[in-house]
Image (cartoon, rainbow, N blue to C red):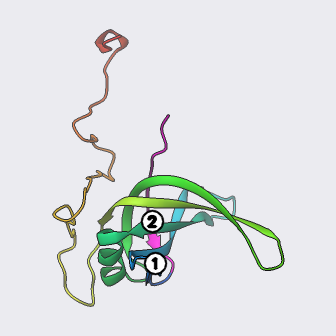
Amino acid sequence: MLNKVVLIGRLTKDPVLKYASSNMTPVTTFTLAVNRNYTQQNGDRLADFIPIVTWRKLAEICGNNLKKGRLVAVAGSIQTRSWDDNSGNRHWVTEVVADEVKFLDSNKSSGNDPMIDIGKDIHSFDIDVDGGDFDGFSPVESEDDLPF
């Protein structure tokens, strides 16, 4: 089975960094606005607003470096969870638990490098957003080139 998602979008507001009360594990949450690939007849472009959760060292990096409007790539898995409130009503949430984040633009306020590589502390990934090859993959010219 496979549960992997890769998203590119902008933060809708500053991330929230908290520490889990049980063991003081850092956790950061933020919402990513991801444009859809088409426009409506009136020219408006719709977007999906996807909740993102990061943990541990990645949570601290995101909480300390990301701000509203920053362009990021996120890779992780989709997770659904539920809880019951005090009135006994069940609530559901679906979110992306990120295990990789790549900052795709510069942090204008601090003058940081426009492509912050956080791979020294966590796994990172590279995405060619212009449609080039992905991690050494290249297009197959004909079905005769397929290995199966």
Report the front residue among 18 and 131.
18
Report the front residue among 147 and 62.
62
Q: Which residue is mark 1?
A: 20
Where residue 47 sits, quadrant-wise, is bottom right
Does 116 sit left or right of 10 as displayed? left
- The residue lying at 41 percent from left, 60 percent from top is 98
Type of amino acid under label 1: Ala
Query: Alpha-carbon neighbours of circle 2 within 10 Å: few (<14), some, or many (≥20)?
Result: many
Q: Nearer the viewer, mark 2 or mark 1?
A: 1
Residue 77 located within the stretch drawn in magenta: no
Cα–Cα span, label 2 and label 1: 27 Å
Sequence-wise, the earlier of marks 2 and 1 is 2
Q: Position of residue 34 (x, y in %)?
A: 51, 63
Q: Position of residue 25 (x, y in %)?
A: 38, 75
Residue 6 located within the stretch drawn in magenta: yes
Q: Which residue is mark 2?
A: 9
Q: Under tag 2, what secondary structure?
A: strand
Type of amino acid under label 2: Gly
- The residue lying at 26 percent from left, 77 percent from top is 106
